[in-house]
Amino acid sequence: MRGAIASAAVLVVLAGCSTDDVDEPTDATASETTSEDTGDAEEPADDTEWFVQADYDEQDAQRSATFEGDEAEPWLQYIDGEMTDTSEFKADGAKKVCFANASVSNPWRQTGFITMTQQLEALKDAGAISDMEVRDAQDDDNTQLADIDYFISEGNCDAFIISPNSTAAMTPGVERACDTGKPVVVFDRGVETDCATTFIHPIGGYAWGIDTANFLSENLEEGDKVIALRILPGVDVLETRWAAAEKIFEENAIDAEDFFTGADPTEIKKIITDALNQGEVKGVWMDAGDGAVAAIEAFEDAGVDYPVMTGEDEMSFLRKWEDTGLTGLAPVYSNFQWRTPLLAVQKIFAGEEVPKEWVLPQTPITEDERAEFLEANDGMPDGHYAKFGGEDLPGFPEAWQDR
């Protein structure tokens, strides 16, 4: 489910959904520095397993970067950088795409896959893509490796799209796809190779953590209590979100205590209720919006003031945020990225350059923008994501409503 990946950097998976679950994408780790004295790799003094200062700084800068392309089509925007020459792939006629998907096991991935299938219809109509064969790994590494190998042995794929289930395990599969000599598009989560024609992802987990922790710190006082609700440990994109937020909370003397919830609404309510029984809670931070409504309901059940809170651009949070009037922010892990891989394939077979690392915009929804996104997504289910970017695609809005 992440961050910026320089061509020489080691890519780390965005494991899990953008936001909801373990299916979110991941950030790149910084290149190791070598000791001149010993020749051994050494990490900078402030780096840890889940915090790399260079990556943090890069994503912080990318939050205010100028993106190339039309703002009305953010799924085609990118940060200027190394481009891939695709002239060798230029070919006439509609091409078949083979998509090895990690899963559609959470609302973020379900929303994105609908957008992708509707983008496919548009490209079929344009004569750019003939078909997309999809295999769903159901969150299993071995299944996805078998899916990739099936596509390769079948021999009927003109291009590969891969959304990896995990980083290291999927790297050999991606490399085998690259070895076919056909274009490979990796998106949403990274792998430990840069052989792909392009790697597509929003800015990353550090950017999420910076946006959210800065917002809470600006709206709270030193010493205020914040409960941080985290889905689970060990998922890179989620860990980097928290690593960035924890750094900022410490710098601003915010008393933040984190808990793992498994995205279980009952557990979320229990955590908040227990914290409120021990004292005043001024803020709630989340590494994904799933369960945000349950957190708010815990404050209502206790009869206390609403917290300052960050959720996500899932419709359930946006609606509850509006209903309550709490002070909030909806960070995003841009769901519209699911359009980009197919559009990248179209460009590749047209012989057009594509970014080697295609970094997409990742801009939170503020209170001033909330009404606009609520109106634009009126009638969508609670599990829908406001920045899905499919309003101009075939089937809108029914395809996203009838899920």
Image: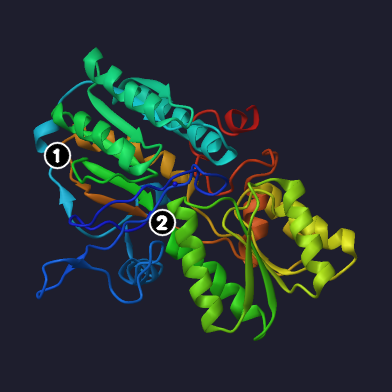
The answer to whether 329 is drawn above or below residue 348 in the figure is below
Based on the displayed image, in which of its 4 quarters is residue 283 positioned?
Answer: bottom right
Circle 2 Cα neighbour tier, 10 Å, few/some/many (<14 / 14–19 / ≥20)? few
The percent position of residue 196, horizontal first and vertical second, equals 22, 40
Give x and y (percent) for residue 331: 55, 60
Q: Write the residue at 48% across / 27% down.
A: 138
Q: How many marks?
A: 2
Residue at point 77% right, 58% down? 296
Q: Of the two numbered discs 1 and 2 on the same chain, state the one appearing first in sequence.
A: 2
Residue 346 shows up from this direction: no
Neighbor class of circle 1 (other Cα within 10 Å; few <14, some 14-19, many 20+) is some
Res 14 seen here: yes
Tag of residue 71: 2
Left or right: residue 76 compared with residue 214: left
Of the two numbered discs 1 and 2 in the rendering, the one whose residue sits closer to the viewer:
1
Cα–Cα span, label 1 and label 2: 25 Å
Q: Is residue 247 above or below residue 144?
A: below
Name, please, the residue furthest toward the front.
Answer: 38
Which of 26/4 is in front? 26
What mark, if any, has residue 9 been given in the picture? none
Q: Amino acid at mark 2?
A: Glu
Query: Quadrant location of the C terminus?
Result: top right
Q: Residue at x 82, y 63 (%)?
A: 299
Q: Quadrant of residue 81?
A: bottom left
Q: Considering depth in this image, is 287 or 66 the residue closer to the camera?
A: 287
Q: Which residue is mark 1?
A: 86
User: In screen coordinates, is 68 left or right of 350?
Assistant: right
Secondary structure of the residue carrying numbered label 2: loop
Left or right: residue 158 compared with residue 54: left
Question: The disc labelled 1 sits on which kind of residue?
Answer: Thr
Q: Point out residue 271 in the picture as x, y percentages from the top left corner.
A: 74, 58
Looking at the picture, how far across and down is residue 400, in whole percent? 59, 33
